[in-house]
Amino acid sequence: MKTPLTVCILLTILACSNKSEKTEAAKDTVRVVGDSGPDGKLQSLSYEQRQGKHLYAKYCAVCHGTEGKGDGFNAFNLDPKPRDFTDSHYMNALSDARLLETISQGGRGVNKSVLMPSWGGRLTNIERTYVVAFIRHLSKRTD
């Protein structure tokens, strides 16, 4: 028969070993965050890009597509078609301030498509900045 002290020690050892397994699983989860680059290697997203990715998925992907190619679910019904954020030549010509202005005021506010809604009333300034960071990631800006 095992003494209560032995049982307590065994439970402590099991609890500690389970905790380290959970920690390792959490580390694996963090490593998964990101996208594969052109060379197939995993690229980590910055904090701002990760936050922007979630907001982009919620508000933008339905028209611009999950990969930013302008091929979202609603793109079929829109004329003109949503911007392709993977066009790095075009995207690199735009300043972050211009992207922020477009997101804030919508297409009508910057003399683009009136079909793009303004997100200034829905998203905070910092959230819009996060979306810009993620859009820059999609365009793989090199400058």
Image (cartoon, grey):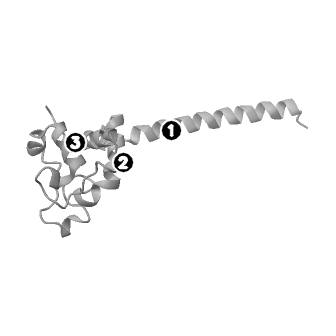
Q: Residue at x 21, y 40 (%)?
A: 136
Above or below, 113 against 132 in this view is: below
Q: CA distance from mark 2 to mark 1?
A: 19 Å
Q: Which residue is mark 1?
A: 26
Q: Amino acid at mark 2?
A: His
Mark 1 burial class by Cα count in 10 Å: few <14, some 14-19, many 20+: few
Q: Amino acid at mark 1?
A: Ala
Going from N to C along the chain, the mark reached first, 2 or 1, is 1
Q: Amino acid at mark 3?
A: Leu
Relative to the observer, which residue lies in front, 137 or 39? 137
| Direction from residue 127 to residue 117 in the image, left or right | left
Which secondary structure lies at badge 2? helix
Which mark identifies residue 54?
A: 2
Q: Which residue is mark 3?
A: 100
Relative to the observer, which residue lies in front, 131 or 122? 122
| Direction from residue 90 to residue 103 in the image, left or right | right
Which one is closest to the eye, mark 2 or mark 1?
2
Where does residue 124 sit, x and y in percent of width and height? 34, 43
Above or below, 86 against 44 in this view is: below
